Image (tube, rainbow, N blue to C red):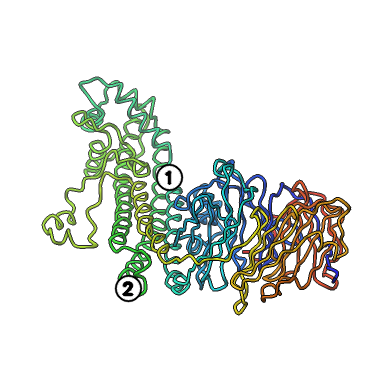
Amino acid sequence: MPELHLEPTYEKQLAAEVSNLVWSPKMDLVAFSLATGGVALYRMTLHRVWSTEPPEEGVSVSALCWRPDGRLLAVGYTSDADVDALDEDDFLPPLSSLSNKYGSVNKHSEEDPQDVQGIADLKTLTVLAVGTRHGQVSLLLHGLLVFCRHDCGAGLEPRVMTFSNDLSRLLVLCGEQTETTKEDTTAQTSTDVGSARLMELDLSVMSGCSEQLRQLATLYGRISSHLVYLDRTIQAICEAWETVLLEMDSKMERFQASLGEDTSLSVEFLELLMFGVPSPEMERFLLTDLTDTGLKKLRHSIELSYTNIQSLVLRHLQPAAFRIADYLLQVAGMVRHKERFGHLGLSEERVVLAQQAVTLFLVKATDIQQVIDSSTRNFVAFFRWLYAVILRLAETSLPPDVGKISQQELSFIAEFVDTNLGDSATARGVHLERVGMYLRNADLEAPPTLGGSQWRRLLSESASLAAAPGIVPPTNGSRSLIQEHDALRRAVAHLFADNADAGARTVRVVPASSLSGQVGPLVAVSALPEGSPGRFLVVLADEQPARLHVAALGSGTAVQVDLHTLLTELGLSPPAGAAPRLCQLCFFSSSVLSALVTDVGAPVYLQLDVAAIAAGSPAVSCSAGRALDNMAPVAMAVSGARSLVAVLFQGGRRARVYDTADGEPEDSVLETTHGSADHNIDDNKENLL
């Protein structure tokens, strides 16, 4: 038997406990799932280059899977949320910051706001298969848009899924769900064994219209990216809105409460404006509660806040909404092109509703601009007048330009008092600051008057125009910007809600070959190249006695490999009475299987060439093995493209990298790092992802 080259190259003490590891198929990156629920990326030198925290407290990583090109990593968590409820922002890169001066959104400053979902460079369709403990398999286009849901059957749980190379078939290997796994929905992985059930799904329809699906998924990704951008923009607007304005409202309300029943705020301020003489209560309020310094601070705060909000609305909010409207227009074109896109589950009625929702959102953004313009004008006049009154009451000399009030300014002050300070007859209350009410998830406390709208009059005079498809009805004046944003999100979700049902109708279950043995945590599946007699290689492991079941689906070839006999043939005979135990299985390449064996003295790394089985021969043509000295392994990850094997020590706090290539590696000296210092991605000059 050939001797396996296995040269240790790097070893390191890890900063956090690791539960699993998977090597990138294309790049020098290995993904570690941490016991804390986070995920970290390491180079082959075991230097960390990136990490992320779990999406919520108390969850752990249940699965890691790289996209075949190695540019995206899918992470499954134990939160067991339904696929419909998944927020792509929880699993994909966050949106970049809008500007370096708007608070907490600044932490995303280095990412592209146009492509937060990372799909701009996808020229072909990418499909992510997700299996749940409830026995459901979902296919997500570009990892975002649900195209199909398939129920595997009662009591079955998908364990391993693999696509064929042309995406026309999906092999699903299921295990029987025991009572333990049905009740325990928080367990990370199930180690209970049961009969293996194979299910092969015919996805030829999806494969045949992959270009149409790619266009649809790309549009959905762009829309969802810009919706997230709107989220971040609204967050920045809320941060730009100063809480000191609420403090002013509360002061006015306390002053109103101190007045008698025969007067009101508006009466007090109008009498002061007309006669120039304040009541004792008004004089005490101006000199004690407001003061000239407080008015200066409040005016500066309002002007700064309104300037920032206007900038965010004009430069970020409205452009993003206009782009969403443009993408929805493209979706509407798809709906009308029934020959190419008619089977994708899109509805013209729902497209119209989504277009109306984005239009109403834009109208509400315009309302905020108008409110800011009028409020700024009236605020300046009102505060300038109050400042002069306070200085006069304090017997302080007035600057030359402060005591003069024009007739137009008097009109602005009267409008401010009437609009903002309430009226005892209508009991409207105090609403000094009118922009903040647009940033709450509640109806507007003082909605603008829309009775004179020309658009309303036109629609009321023409019933046929109002009923025409695509005509946007008058805006709901009582709804806030937050409510319109939520309505837009719901309309987009409703637009794409039927894609999963439409896709499910195109999927056909193909009777798969039976496979003897039990299915537990040790399962390996590989898609065979085109032209092979079979479609998939499936490997199952039995514990007692320790053996492998290898089958090539489609060719009818299957073989059993006794582990004890194989180790003896390789000169790695276990000690007397020892029972070899398979620790992990994974494919080194499409036809080479890697296995980690323990409980045989020194642990053993095995490579089995199963190409002969894939070709129809019931035999393992070539095998090799090597003992792993001075370690107790619990998991491994292999990279056939780079001839590397990463092994995790017991306890999950130490890892070692081996080079399996023949010949001297570039750095054959074992690099051992005893510290736990990590390298941030900013220290690496290469573009990793």
Kind of residue at badge 2: His
* Count of numbered badges drawn on the protein: 2
Give the SS element for disc 1: helix
Nearer to us in this view, 341 or 591: 591
Q: Which residue is mark 1?
A: 238
Give the SS element for disc 2: loop
Q: Earlier in the sequence, mark 1 or mark 2?
A: 1
Instruction: Give the Cα separation between the discs numbered 1 and 2.
Output: 41 Å
Quarter of the rendering containing residue 506: bottom left
Residue drawn where x is 27% and y is 34% of the image: 421
Residue drawn where x is 18% and y is 29% of the image: 425
Q: Position of residue 69 (x, y in %)?
A: 61, 69
Nearer to us in this view, 475 or 572: 572
Nearer to us in this view, 667 or 173: 173
Kind of residue at badge 1: Cys
Picture disc at residue 452: none
Q: Is residue 654 above or below residue 538?
A: above
Q: Which residue is mark 2?
A: 337
Nearer to us in this view, 420 or 450: 450
